[in-house]
Amino acid sequence: FGAVISACEKAGKWEKVLQIVNEMAQRNMQPNTIVFNACISACQKGSEWMRGLQFLSVMARSEVRPSSITYNAAISACDKGGEWENASGLLDVMVQGSV
C-alpha cells in the first residue's frame, strides 16, 4: 500500500489516499510514519490542510511517532491554507518534542 500511497501523494490525489488508508484499516493494517507522511503531503498538495492535521491526530491516537518530515508536511499544508497560527503551533510542538 505504501508505494501506491506515495504515487498518489506525488500526483496530489488526496481523495485516493483516503480510500487506500480506509482499506488498510478494514484489513487491520496499521500505517507507519512513512505512509502518514505521504498522506499529509497529499493533503498539502490538494489544499486540504485540515485533513492533513486530522492525519497528524490519527498518528497520535495510533501511537505512531511523527518525524520532522511529518511536521514539515503538516506545516506546509497549513501554510498553503493560510493557517499561519496552526503552522506556528506545529512548529512549537515540533521543537518541544525535540523532533
Image (spheres, rainbow, N blue to C red):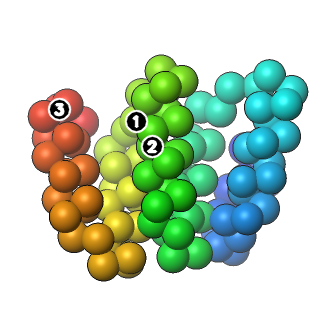
Q: Which mark is residue 56?
A: 2
Q: CA distance from mark 1 to mark 2?
A: 8 Å
Q: Is residue 3 left or right of residue 33?
A: right
Q: Closer to us: mark 1 or mark 2?
A: 2
User: Looking at the picture, does residue 17 appear above or below residue 92?
Assistant: below
Q: Is residue 92 visible?
A: yes
Say which residue label 1 marks. Answer: 66
Q: Which mark is residue 98?
A: 3
Q: Which residue is nearer to you in this view: 71 or 18?
A: 18
Callout 2: SS: helix
Disc 1 residue type (three-letter): Pro
> Where's residue 47, x and y in %?
51, 76
Callout 1: SS: loop
Q: CA distance from mark 1 to mark 3?
A: 11 Å
Identified at 67% across, 65% down, the residue is 14
Identified at 71% across, 70% down, the residue is 13
